[in-house]
Image: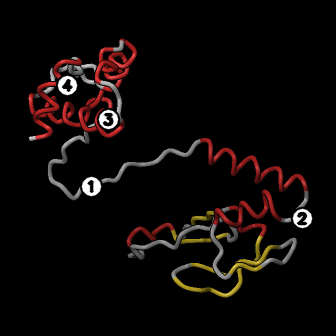
Amino acid sequence: MDLKIYYTRRYMVTQPSSSKNIPRNKHKPRSFSEVWDYFVKGVKKNNGHYEAICSYCKKIWSRGKRAQLEAHLANECASCPDDISRYWREKVAERDINYTRRPKKSSALPNPMPQTTMTSHYMSDCPLTKAITSRLDQKIIKAWVMAGIPFDIIDNLFIRDMFKEFNPAYSSPSRTTLSNRLFDEELA
């Protein structure tokens, strides 16, 4: 009988080579991270999770999570040898440097529309609609009246430049338009 020999992390397993026909469990148990070599597995909690006890300082976690255990060896454990601590600091730093956020696989909407960005809304050179221009003019007249700003300030080149910076497509009203038409509309 032919035997296949392979090694797992802690065990040597022999298996008949004719095991291809043997049905296997669909869910393989998850292998443990190498950080567990520095911790004692305590009581099994649930679903493959174990209590963790540091081999050096004997600190106990009710549920050992890989990232927490790595961070403990890298930064917190005073009893951990320097070479091991250094190894885990580099490992944690490498993981943090190489981290990339994965996009969600599916969207709740069948055909999601792209989100409008601020720059596409405010920094556009496209002409503004009459409704938007009118709304902005009303905001300016309210601000000028409520703040007691003289109407001739609107013609100052620096003020005009400021409005162009806010939205290049917007042309601020002149002093006469501000003091006559817009002021009268606002009072009405």
Residue at x-position 63% and y-position 79%: 63
For the residues labelled 4 and 2, the Cα–Cα distance comes to: 74 Å
Which tag, 1 or 3, sits closer to the chain's start? 1
Placement of 129 over or under 97, stated as above or below: above
Dot 4 alpha-carbon crowd within 10 angstroms: few under 14, some 14 to 19, many 20 or more: some
Q: Is residue 44 left or right of residue 184?
A: right
On the image, numbered disc 2 is attached to which residue?
78
Which tag, 1 or 2, sits closer to the chain's start? 2
For the residues labelled 1 and 2, the Cα–Cα distance comes to: 45 Å
Q: Position of residue 56 (x, y in %)?
A: 87, 71
Quadrant showing the C terminus:
top left
For the residues labelled 4 and 1, the Cα–Cα distance comes to: 55 Å
Q: Along the line of sight, which residue is nearer the eye, 114 or 106? A: 114
For the residues labelled 1 and 3, the Cα–Cα distance comes to: 25 Å
Q: Amino acid at mark 3?
A: Met
Which tag, 4 or 2, sits closer to the chain's start? 2
For the residues labelled 4 and 3, the Cα–Cα distance comes to: 32 Å
- Comparing labels 4 and 3, the label whose residue is closer to the camera: 4
Image mark count? 4
For the residues labelled 2 and 3, the Cα–Cα distance comes to: 49 Å
On the image, numbered disc 3 is attached to which residue?
118
Q: Position of residue 132 (x, y in %)?
A: 15, 33
Element under disc 1: loop
Asked if the residues shown at circle 1 and circle 3 are in contact, with their CB atoms under 8 angstroms apart, the answer is: no
On the image, numbered disc 1 is attached to which residue?
106
Element under disc 3: helix
Q: Amino acid at mark 2?
A: Ala
Residue at x-position 19% and y-position 35%: 138
Q: Position of residue 178 (x, y in %)?
A: 20, 25
Q: Amino acid at mark 4?
A: Ser
